Amino acid sequence: MNWPQLRERYLVTADDAVLALNKPAGISVTGERHDTDIVQLAAAAGQTLYPVHRIDKATSGLVLLASDLTAHGELTRQFNKQTARKAYLAIVEDPGLPDRGIIDLPLSVGRKNRVRIAAPREAIRESGSGRWYVDEDELLDTKRYPSVTHFATVARTGGRAVLALRPITGRRHQIRVHLAWIGHPIVGDPLFDKTGAHRRAHLHSWRLGLTASWRTPPELDLEATPDSDFWQPAPEAAADPTGLLRRANELLGDG
């Protein structure tokens, strides 16, 4: 797929400063070795784009890119200051997942540049009220990055759960690692699901809210609806995706 085709098929919104895409799973935003990515495709067609943030190749959904450097700086500062409002959807394995939870587990980088929890797996505690944490004296003696993810369980079906998630911090692989290490890996995640039964990771960048001073009103409030492929492991949820997304908004306090 070339850039004009990709833009036409997956465009969410665009103005003179930015554009947002509902990225399909399986294509990189930028920087993947030996792989064609969105930034490269746009450059080959004569358009220079600057990623405001990144989502993983295996993740579908909203990705925001700037064509104007002033706008790029304004938006990236909001991600750096953790004031960007982000919401994701995920389908996970569900052995006893609570209705709501907070995963407060710092991340580190291990062998082969792999992101991991900065503590032994057996040190992870669950408070009984849906909060996962590690005691300070159990943390590894390594560089670590505070990482917090909030979630709400939107639906349960066939031993799986549909989650709405807010990553409060924005670390690389944060949602994927957090869910896997508490025992609820994302279905199809190539890092943690080795069954090979699914063609993609069922994680979707769903909503994004930022201040955008050049717009009237001065805000970006974006939403990317998952396609039918996302819902495949949860067919009962797929029967009413509109109702499910409405419930996800309510659980996150957005509707």
Image: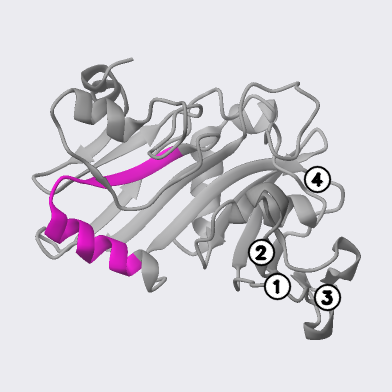
The correct choice, above or below, for 147 with respect to 239 in the image is below
**Pointer 2 or 4: first along the chain:** 4
Residue 18 is left or right of residue 106, and the answer is left
Specify whether 186 is left or right of 33: right
As helix, strand or loop, the secondary structure at mark 1 comes to: loop
Instruction: Quickly name the residue at label 3.
Output: 127
The stretch in magenta equals: 61-78
Q: Quadrant of the N terminus?
A: top left
Give me the C-alpha separation between circle 1 and circle 4.
Answer: 31 Å
Q: Amino acid type of disc 4?
A: Asp
- Give neighbour class at mark 2: few <14, some 14-19, many 20+ (Cα, 10 Å): many
**In which quadrant will I find the C terminus?**
bottom left
Residue 103 visible (yes or no): yes
Q: How is the image coloured?
A: one colour
Q: Is residue 160 left or right of residue 16?
A: right
Q: Residue 185 appears in which quarter of the rendering?
A: top right
> Disc 1 residue type?
Thr
Q: The residue under label 3 is which amino acid type?
A: Ser
Earlier in the chain: of badge 3 and badge 2, it is 2
Q: Position of residue 240 (x, y in %)?
A: 56, 32
1 or 3: mark nearer the eye: 1
Residue at the spot x=79%, y=68% of the render? 119
Q: Indicate which disc, 1 or 3, sits on the residue closer to the N terminus.
A: 3
> Which residue is at 52% across, 49% downward?
88
The answer to the question of whether label 1 and label 2 lie on touching residues, with beta carbons closer than 8 A, is yes
Numbered label attached to residue 108: 2
CA gap between label 1 and label 2 equals 7 Å
Disc number placed over residue 229 in the picture, else none: none
Q: Which residue is mark 1?
A: 142
